[in-house]
Amino acid sequence: MESLQKYTEAERFYELDEAVLDTLEKLTLKQHTQVILQIDSCIGTLEKKNDLSQIVAGIIPGREPIYYGLRYVNEEEMTPYFFHLFKITLDEYLDLYNLNKIIKS
């Protein structure tokens, strides 16, 4: 599986799986950019858990907001690896919000 390594200003890297890149390509350029900027902004706040995948939720604002989930692995001594980007419902977003598992933009 190919992945893209992304550089952020804090000299941190993260990887996007090809599946995430494919999903991003289906979005408009504006939506795609918003998701990438949100990922960039949350890298330093992601909890590290070895051997466990985690989920964080985000929102693409607009007249009809798009709520999304992003699965990732973030282990000690490793770069975060995002492997699944998918749409979620408002209820699912609010559940993750209550668990403090959202990207704060």
Image (cartoon, grey):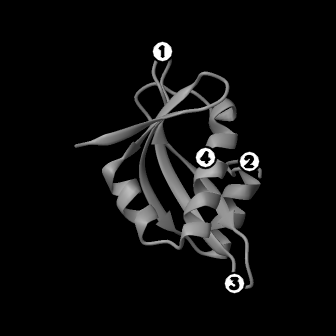
Question: Looking at the picture, which amino acid does disc 2 mark?
Answer: Asn
Secondary structure under tag 3 reads loop
Q: Earlier in the sequence, mark 1 or mark 2?
A: 1
At label 3, which amino acid type do we have?
A: Glu
- Residue 50 in percent (x, y) is at 46, 24
For image coordinates 69% across by 50% down, the residue present is 103
Amino acid carrying mark 4 in the image = Ile
Q: Residues within 10 Å of mark 2 (few under 14, many from 20)?
A: few
The CA span between labels 3 and 1 is 39 Å
SS at circle 1: loop
The amino acid marked with disc number 1 is: Glu
Residue under label 1, please give it.
77
Mark with earlier residue (3, 2): 3
Q: Which mark is residue 40?
A: none
Q: CA distance from mark 3 to mark 4?
A: 21 Å
Q: Residues within 10 Å of mark 1 (few under 14, many from 20)?
A: few
Question: Which residue is labeled 2 in the image?
Answer: 100
Q: Residue furthest bottom?
A: 63
Nearest to viewer (mark 1 / mark 2): 1
Q: Earlier in the sequence, mark 4 or mark 2?
A: 4
Q: Nearer the viewer, residue 57 or 30?
A: 30
Q: Quadrant of residue 91?
A: bottom right
- The residue wearing badge 3 is 64
In the figure, is residue 34 to the left or right of 22? Answer: right
Disc 4 from disc 2: Cα separation: 16 Å
Dot 4 corresponds to which residue? 39
Give the residue displayed 52% in from the left and 53% down from the top: 70
Identify the element where label 2 is drawn: loop
